[in-house]
Amino acid sequence: MRLCDRDIEAWLDEGRLSITPRPPVERINGATVDVRLGNKFRTFRGHTAAFIDLSGPKDEVSAALDRVMSDEIVLPDGEAFYLPSGRIGAGRNL
């Protein structure tokens, strides 16, 4: 499902969509929300898992993620993070 900017704002207002911290209106454009990322990242390693069940107990979810993701990458302030083409990464927003 894609939401336009007006729908994103409405869903945020109604609590149907949650982004914490809530982005300012100027960061909601078209069908996207611009977020600022922190300095902690993880990338997916090559794996054969067809899916990861996120509905299970927290310790099982953490173990499944640890099997397919890198150790946490912590960047010093001002250092860039480059994600190679074709790779998937996960970061934390500010």
Image (tube, helix red, strand yellow):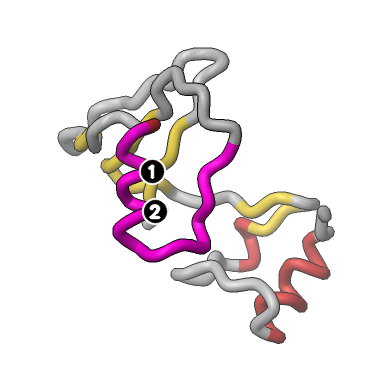
Q: Which residue is mark 2?
A: 61
Which dot marks residue 49?
none
Percent coordinates x, y for residue 71 in the rendering: 23, 33
Residue extent of the magenta highlight: 51-67
Callout 2: SS: helix
Query: Which image quadrant is residue 41 in?
Result: top left
Query: Which image quadrant is residue 2 in?
Result: bottom right
Residue 72 lies in magenta, yes or no?
A: no
| Front position in the image: 64 or 30 | 64
Please say if the residues under marks 2 and 1 sit with CB atoms less than 8 Å apart. Answer: yes
The quadrant in which the C terminus is found is: bottom left
Percent coordinates x, y for residue 19 in the rendering: 54, 67
Residue depicted at 43% across the width and 21% down the height: 83
Residue 57 lies in magenta, yes or no?
A: yes
Is 87 situated above or below 73? above
Kind of residue at disc 2: Val
Q: Which residue is mark 1?
A: 64
Kind of residue at disc 1: Ala
Callout 1: SS: helix
- Position of 27 with respect to 93 (left or right) is right
Residue depicted at 76% across the width and 78% down the height: 10
